Each structure stands twice: as C-alpha cells, then as structure tokens.
Image (spheres, grey):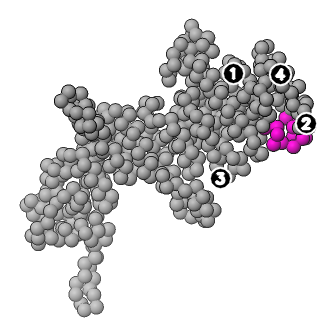
C-alpha cells in the first residue's frame, strides 16, 4: 500500500533498520492512522482527521497505483460524500488543513473547502430567509433561523483562509451585512487581546532581527480592512470602524490601511460621537491625541460634500435635500461643525498640541458649518490658558488672521474675539458680549 517516499535509512546501535520520514503531514498522529489502515486496524474517518489522512496519504503515495481502494481514495470519498456537504464539516476540515502543511494546498483541499463553505453559507442564508417569512414559524424559532450561527466558527480560521472564504462568499451572493458581522466578530476574537503597554515593551526590546511579535496582529488588521474595502459602507458599524482605527494606530498598520478606515469614517462622520474622535496618538508622539488622523477624516468628509454637491448642480453647497449617506444634508455639515468644536475643546489642553495643527482644524471647516461660534471661542480660550504668555502673544496674531478669510457676517464676531484675546493675554480680564458665552 505504501510507495517509496522521501526518507533516510540508517541502523541503530543494535543493528536494527531505522527509517526516518521528514516533514510528515499531520505528524505522528496522521502516520499512525496510515499505519493502522495498512494493517487493517479499524478506525473512524471524521471531519476532524480526514484532512490529515488525505495529506499523509499523498505524502506516502497511497494511491490506486499501489493498491485498490487505497487511503487516498477512501479520504476523497469521505470528503465528497460527507465532510464537504455540510457547512460545519467543511469548516472543520478547513481548520485541520493547517496540520497538512503545503500538501493541503498541493492537492487542492484548501480550495475545495473554501468553495464548500461559501456554497453552504449561501444555502443557509437562503433557508433562514425563507424560514423567517413562514407564518407557521414562531418568533423564537424565526430568530434562530435568521441567526448566522457560523459567523463564530469562521473566527477560528487563520487569517489567509478567512480572507479566501469571505471572497468566495461574496461571489456566492452572501449579504454584505452578514460579511460585515463576520468581520467584526473575527476582529473581536483576534484583536481583543491587543495590549498597548505590552506592545511598547516588546517593541523597545526588539533587536530588529526576525519578525516583530506583533506583526501577526498588524496582518489581521490590514487584511480585515482590505476585506471591508469592497463591501457596502454600512456593512459594519461606525463604532467598529473607530475601534479598528485605534488598533491600526497601535499596531502601526500600513498607511493605505489607515487611509481606508479614515475614508469610511469620513463617509459617516456626522453620526460620530465626540469620544469616537479621541484617538490616542502613537507611542512615538508626545501628543495625547492623534490630531492628524482626525484632520484627514474631516478632509474626507468635506471631499464627500464637494462630490455630492457637484453631482447636483441645482443645489447650493450649503443646502441638501437628502439625509442619505451619498447626499449629506446641510444638517449633517452643521452636526460635524458642532462635533469638531467639541473636539477642539477636548484636545486644546494638550500642552504638546502645535498651533499649526490646531489652526488647521479650525480653518478646514467651511463658513456655513457654524451658525454661532461660541464653541470655537471656548476651544481657543482653553488652548490659550495652557500656554505661556509669550506664546499667547504669538498665538493672538495667528487667530486674528483667521478673520481675514471669513465672510462679512462672521468678521465682526472675529473682531470681538480679537479684542477678547487682547484683554485676556495677562489672564486677568475677560470680556462677555452678545453671542459669546461665559468661558
């Protein structure tokens, strides 16, 4: 039943013949099963061991050329008739392909498992959708039918297999929201243990030789973001995107990965909360918050505004009729304006926040993003309070220059702000006027 395989022959101290097999797929366990098969010892082929059996049989060349109904044929029959005909069986075999090493790819086992999982998932989705509409199905049973129970099982796959499964599911017509739920669950499974302080200690001790211990987490983040790049904008929640963005910063993900996350956040920025924007700065920065990331998110949002307004030439840039994701209303712009004023007030106390970055956020918003400027005044006041007196004088001229670029209606308000700044440079006199809240 066995053909000659890659091996080396030698003799032990007693003169007995010794056969050494290198890199046996599935290790000693798979080889023991193959030996039992040769000697006619009964054992059960299951979804948990068929991948190892198929790979070790290929390695040992246990084909029909050596013996009729050999182990390769037996394993293939079980795969076709049992294991790959169900979703849980195909997932189990795919997970066990890791034990088969490169042989699993060579015999096409991984590809067949991927296709089987995608096809079964499509059928499960169809059946659950039909069951949910059956009048005879009670509410609890309908909820169980609609639940994509296999989402958790997908999270057990290694990241390269998972990516191939998701690509196959997309081709088979699995719903984008189901794929989004799977991506979110996979991220929670593999990234929930990201320890920021531990990563920093490991990075500090890393000697530069070999892969960094955190490279696996970075690969997971970049792959999941790449998977999401082809999905619908609303396939995952906004909070999940912000969570992924924070992890991407911590694991030092690629620039393309972060830009894609920032773009997706910018598509729905008006729905964000202030806490979402408080992304901690990378460990290499002295600042508390990653202001550059928020600047790029805001820029992405404004680019979306320009694209939508240019697509509808009949609408002025500050007036939109639709609240949809692809056609943001003026109300969305106002929401973002209030959000950014709140963000400026939160980051203003950071003593390491540079004036150029603070001013860039202020100037980036269009004039119609604010109805009143109370929030902006408050943020500037907080920023000045943490600065030394000589820095306040320099900052005054920077803030005063903003008035040159605003429209006539706002210019008077900025003049009031300039007077306020002059009298508050020594920290003793504060002004109040109509339209300006007490700081």
Query: Which residue is drawn at the image coordinates 35% and 52% (left, top)?
Result: 156
Which span of residues is magenta-colored?
383-395
Q: Is residue 281 above or below residue 276?
A: below
Q: Position of residue 435 (x, y in %)?
A: 77, 20
Query: Which residue is drawn at the image coordinates 88% and 25% (left, top)?
Result: 419
The quadrant the C terminus occupies is top right
Q: Is residue 18 above or below residue 137?
A: below
Gap in Å between the C-alphas at discs 2 and 3? 37 Å
Gap in Å between the C-alphas at discs 4 and 3? 42 Å
Secondary structure beneath disc 4?
loop
Mark 3 Cα within 10 Å, few/some/many (few <14, many 20+)?
Answer: some
Residue in front for this viewpoint, 265 or 335: 335
Q: Which residue is mark 4?
A: 433
Q: Which residue is mark 3?
A: 283
**Badge nearest the viewer, 2 or 1:** 2
Q: Is residue 49 above or below residue 169?
A: below
Q: Which residue is mark 2?
A: 428
Mark 4 Cα within 10 Å, few/some/many (few <14, many 20+)?
Answer: few
Query: Which residue is drawn at the image coordinates 58% and 34% (left, top)?
Result: 273
């Amino acid at each position: 039943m066995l053909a000659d395989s890659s091996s080396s022959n030698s003799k032990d101290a007693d003169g007995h013949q010794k056969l050494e097999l290198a890199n046996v797929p599935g290790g000693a366990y798979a080889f023991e099963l193959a030996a039992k098969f040769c000697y006619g010892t009964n054992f059960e082929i299951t979804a948990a061991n068929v991948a190892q059996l198929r790979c070790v049989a290929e390695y040992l060349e246990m084909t029909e050329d050596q013996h009729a109904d050999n182990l390769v044929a037996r394993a293939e029959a079980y795969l076709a008739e049992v294991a790959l005909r169900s979703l849980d069986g195909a997932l189990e075999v795919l997970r066990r392909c890791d034990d088969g090493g490169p042989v699993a790819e060579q015999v096409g086992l991984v590809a067949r498992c991927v296709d089987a999982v995608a096809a079964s998932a499509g059928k499960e989705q169809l059946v659950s959708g039909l069951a949910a509409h059956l009048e005879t199905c009670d509410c609890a049973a309908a909820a169980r039918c609609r639940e994509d129970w296999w989402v958790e099982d997908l999270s057990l796959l290694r990241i390269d297999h998972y990516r191939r499964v998701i690509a196959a599911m997309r081709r088979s017509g699995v719903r984008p929201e189901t794929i989004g739920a799977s991506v979110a669950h996979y991220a929670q499974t593999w990234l929930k243990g990201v320890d920021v302080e531990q990563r920093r200690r490991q990075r500090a001790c890393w000697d530069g030789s070999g892969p960094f211990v955190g490279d696996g987490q970075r690969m997971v983040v970049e792959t999941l973001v790449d998977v999401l790049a082809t999905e619908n904008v609303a396939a995952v929640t906004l909070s999940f995107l912000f969570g992924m963005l924070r992890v991407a910063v911590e694991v030092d993900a690629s620039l393309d990965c972060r830009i894609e996350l920032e773009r997706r956040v910018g598509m729905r920025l008006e729905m964000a909360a202030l806490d979402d924007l408080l992304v901690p700065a990378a460990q290499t920065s002295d600042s508390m918050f990653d202001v550059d990331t928020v600047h790029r998110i805001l820029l992405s949002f404004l680019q979306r505004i320009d694209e939508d307004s240019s697509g509808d030439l009949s609408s002025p840039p500050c007036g939109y009729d639709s609240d949809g994701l692809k056609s943001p209303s003026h109300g969305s712009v106002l929401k973002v304006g209030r959000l950014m004023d709140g963000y400026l007030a939160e980051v203003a106390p950071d003593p390491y926040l540079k004036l150029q970055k603070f001013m860039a956020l202020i100037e980036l918003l269009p004039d119609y993003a604010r109805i009143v400027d109370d929030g902006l005044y408050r943020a500037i006041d907080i920023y000045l309070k943490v600065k030394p007196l000589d820095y306040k004088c320099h900052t005054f001229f920077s803030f005063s220059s903003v008035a040159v670029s605003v429209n006539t209606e706002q210019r008077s308000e900025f003049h009031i702000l300039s007077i306020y700044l002059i009298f508050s440079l020594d920290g003793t006199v504060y002004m109040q006027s109509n339209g300006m809240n007490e700081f």
